[in-house]
């Protein structure tokens, strides 16, 4: 029920954003402390990269599909997106997805698509083609989008997914590539903080961090404990009367949504920790819920 309620809440929020009238206020400033997603700290709450990419960042750069998804040679209503990955467990697939914003008709493409997966060594040098596919796309619309997925070998290692786009006459339009990393299933959730030492009046931000490959689910709720006399004791969370009902999903190598803890000016110095319950994203196939803890110090 909690998951359904969270999904409904997120859907309502999205609907409100989509329904905003012309001339409505722009998106909140990520550096504004009142921003409900960054809390004034976008580097921590909305980082550019993963917390663990399993070595992909050490490989040579590739010509990847544009972040915007826009194709300079294609219709404005058609975009491309890399779906799934780049961290996969054995048996998972990855590939590209051609999206269409044409909801009332058909957009002519006349494209010939070829995709393939190559082996890649630790230095990024491509090897032989391990799997391949092809598809011809004459028309596309929102109800008939095009998915180009392949499954890499189950053996752990680096791979490269490539998609080549040409027209029906054979004219080459583009080739985009993206690295994949196949890793064994690994459960390694951690709780990260925006710092390890704070003062009364500061804001402590926490987030779930996935250093493994198994997906993690979590919500906003957490507990606050103080270390006194050699033991940890629960402490009331200041200025907190309830919790927002959202359910977060943290994929392999990623970080979750930030949760704030505001320390009043009267907050006593000492050793504290935030404790948060997380679960397996593959529930009920995964294990039982787990409590994560992250310590911090409050100084005068």
Image (cartoon, rainbow, N blue to C red):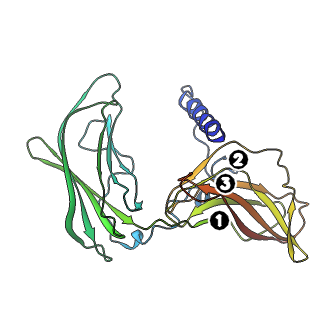
Mark 1 to mark 3 CA distance (whole Å)? 17 Å
List x then y, in percent, for residue 232. 84, 69
Residue 34 badge: 2
Circle count: 3
Q: Residue at x 70, y 47 (%)?
A: 34
List x then y, in percent, for residue 128. 19, 68
List x then y, in percent, for residue 235. 87, 60
Query: Which residue bears the numbered disc 1?
Result: 192
* Of the two numbered discs 1 and 3 in the rendering, the one whose residue sits closer to the viewer: 1
In front of the other: 104 or 227: 227
- Mark 2 or mark 1, which is nearer the start of the sequence? 2
Q: Residue at x 27, y 44 (%)?
A: 72
Along the horizontal axis of the image, is 284 left or right of 246? left
Mark 1 to mark 2 CA distance (whole Å)? 21 Å
Q: Is residue 24 visible?
A: no
Q: Residues within 10 Å of mark 1 (few under 14, many from 20)?
A: many
List x then y, in percent, for residue 84. 40, 53
Query: Looking at the rendering, which quadrant does residue 277 occupy?
Result: bottom right
Q: Is residue 149 visible?
A: yes
In the image, residue 132 above or below residue 73 = below
- Mark 3 or mark 2, which is nearer the start of the sequence? 2
Query: Which residue bears the numbered disc 3?
Result: 40
* Of the two numbered discs 1 and 2 in the rendering, the one whose residue sits closer to the viewer: 1
Whether tag 2 and tag 3 are in contact, CB under 8 A, the answer is yes
- Mark 3 or mark 1, which is nearer the start of the sequence? 3
Identify the secondary structure beneath mark 3.
loop
Considering every residue shown, the one lying at the far left of the view is 169
Considering every residue shown, the one lying at the far top of the view is 104
């Amino acid at each position: 029920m909690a998951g359904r309620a969270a999904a409904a809440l997120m859907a309502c929020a999205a609907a409100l954003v989509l329904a905003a009238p012309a001339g409505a206020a722009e998106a909140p400033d990520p550096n504004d402390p009142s921003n409900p997603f960054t809390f004034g700290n976008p580097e921590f709450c909305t980082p550019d990269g993963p917390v663990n990419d399993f070595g992909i960042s050490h490989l040579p750069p590739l010509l990847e599909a544009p972040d915007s998804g826009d194709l300079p040679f294609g219709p404005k209503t058609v975009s491309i997106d890399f779906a799934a990955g780049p961290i996969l467990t054995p048996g998972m697939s990855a590939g590209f997805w051609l999206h269409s914003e044409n909801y009332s008709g058909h957009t002519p493409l006349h494209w010939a698509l070829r995709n393939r997966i190559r082996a890649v060594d630790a230095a990024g040098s491509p090897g032989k083609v391990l799997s391949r596919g092809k598809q011809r796309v004459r028309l596309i619309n929102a109800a008939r989008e095009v998915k180009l997925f392949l499954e890499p070998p189950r053996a752990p290692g680096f791979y490269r997914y490539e998609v080549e786009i040409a027209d029906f006459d054979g004219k080459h339009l583009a080739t985009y590539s993206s690295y994949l990393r196949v890793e064994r299933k690994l459960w390694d959730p951690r709780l990260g903080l925006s710092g390890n030492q704070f003062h009364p009046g500061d804001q402590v931000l926490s987030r779930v961090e996935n250093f493994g490959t198994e997906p993690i689910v979590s919500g906003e709720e957490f507990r606050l404990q103080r270390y006194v006399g050699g033991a940890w004791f629960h402490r009331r969370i200041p200025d907190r009367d309830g919790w927002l009902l959202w359910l977060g999903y943290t994929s392999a190598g990623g970080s979750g949504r930030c949760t704030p803890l505001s320390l009043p000016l009267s907050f006593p110095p000492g050793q504290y920790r935030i404790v948060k319950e997380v679960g397996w994203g593959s529930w009920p196939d995964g294990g039982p819920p787990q409590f994560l803890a992250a310590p911090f110090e409050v100084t005068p």
